[in-house]
Amino acid sequence: MLSRGTVALLSAGLIAAAAAAGAMLWLHGDLADGDRASADRGDGYVGRDAATRDDAPLRYDTEYPTMHYATAPRGDAIEKLEARLSSGAVKLDAGPRGYLDSLLAALDIDASSQTLVFSQTSLQSRRINPRTPRAIYFNDDVYVAWVQNGPLEIASLDPNLGPVFYLLDNDTKGAKIAPRPPFTRELTRCLSCHDSYSLSGGGVPRFIVGSGYTGPAGNLVSHEGWILVEDSTPLEDRWGGWYVTGKSGEQKHLGNVLIRNQQDFDRLDELRRGNLETLDALFDTKPYLTDKSDIVALLILEHQVNAQNAITRANFDIRTAIDRERGASHAKDGYELPADQLSAETRKAIDEAVEPLVRTLLFADETTLTAPVSGDPRFVEQFMSRAIKDPSGRSLRDLDRRTRMFRYPLSYVVYSPAFDALPRAAREAVYRRIGALLRGAQGDAMVARLRPDERTAILEIFAATKAEFAAALGQ
């Protein structure tokens, strides 16, 4: 099964990167073999020379000049952490995993969010295999990847710029450990994969989660089997190249599967290994923060990055449309104009840009679970600790996990700084569309799976917890 995004990814110039990437292309896509051979520093890390990084113009600054992606002030979690480090309010301590433990604490990322990728996914491909998987930890707006004996890879969601990528040197031998280590922002190496929409022009930075058949060395063994994972992806096609713990009943998935030869494709169902409590029997988990790669965390991660990508796409397109109407010198003032003060052409562009976002926020294409899914209670507890509840104690983070992930299917990312940073006319368009869909007596196909009482509950929760939405509904 190849998604629309996968076809775009493989269609022009990134086949080598996709072939090397395996299960996941976010937090640094791999390089083509020619780049790898010429740029390998000899320590397992694949890089490019400074001229390649710095001399080429950044695509986004050409296609979306209003965004100033390379030069605009940042407001993401790493920029805020850097300010705290500079002021001495916090410092990073070194441990057996270098800065990892203290960095997660400083960013308020819980260890229970750990998911493990054994496909050779990042610029550190030589360090990654089924015995030494890459660990990914995350909260609502920042993702940290740790590979044994390698630099930390960080992807942070900036409210205005979208995904921003960093490296942090993490020499566990102590030679380069310092209380205020420098974060290096990556503007080209990461974006060689993370701007893959740009193959046809007009791309935006994004997080990418994928699944592919992976061999015992962590290599992708089938180009055609690699897919981008979306809410619509069936579980049986997810998590190739990942470890997965937790229970999913009889539902099959590709987690924990190694493809050793062509014959393994013919007996794939025999190789599927689900419903694992821990990963201790598969590799040495002692270097990691937990012995799990939680299935619930994976499902949350996959939805979250797709929702954040949809916000980023809408933000870039809508700001550009406002810029086109008002001119560069006045575009910023236009970001908080109501829709009725913008031209009909711009309003049409805004409505078209928010439609895919609304579809994602409402889980319109979510695959159906055929059995209950459960994982580490600690992950659920910390995830729910950030819930914004209505007077009845309901929230958009309430989990279902029986036939779908959430009890009230409207994404919790509507509370995020990134959503709030959308131009006012865009937020208004989202509110109008959500209100019309959930109030619609006929049940639009986008919400047809929801019972009338469920649609009402979502409206009530959102209106009670988001004043701007309540105002848009006239409440």
Image (spheres, rainbow, N blue to C red):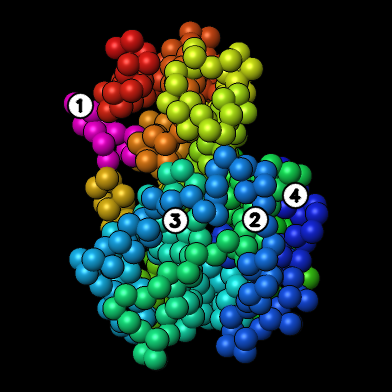
Considering only order in the chain, which callout, 4 or 1, is on the residue closer to the N terminus? 4
| Amino acid marked by disc 1 | Ser
- Dot 4 crowding, Cα within 10 Å, few <14, some 14–19, many 20+: some
Q: Which residue is mark 3?
A: 156
Tag shown at residue 392: 1
Residue 48 among magenta residues: no
Tag shown at residue 28: none
Q: How far is disc 3 from disc 2 in space, using C-alphas? A: 19 Å
| Amino acid marked by disc 2 | Leu
Observer-side mark, 3 or 1, equals 3
Q: How far is disc 2 from disc 1 in space, using C-alphas? A: 49 Å
Q: How far is disc 4 from disc 2 in space, using C-alphas? A: 14 Å
| Amino acid marked by disc 4 | Leu
Q: Secondary structure at mark 4?
A: helix
Residue 325 % position (x, y):
60, 24
Q: What is the residue that sits farthest to the front in this orientation?
A: 329
Q: Which residue is mark 4?
A: 199
Considering only order in the chain, which callout, 2 or 4, is on the residue closer to the N terminus? 2
294, 263: nearer the viewer: 294
In the image, the segment drawn in magenta is 387-398
Picture quadrant of residue 421:
top left
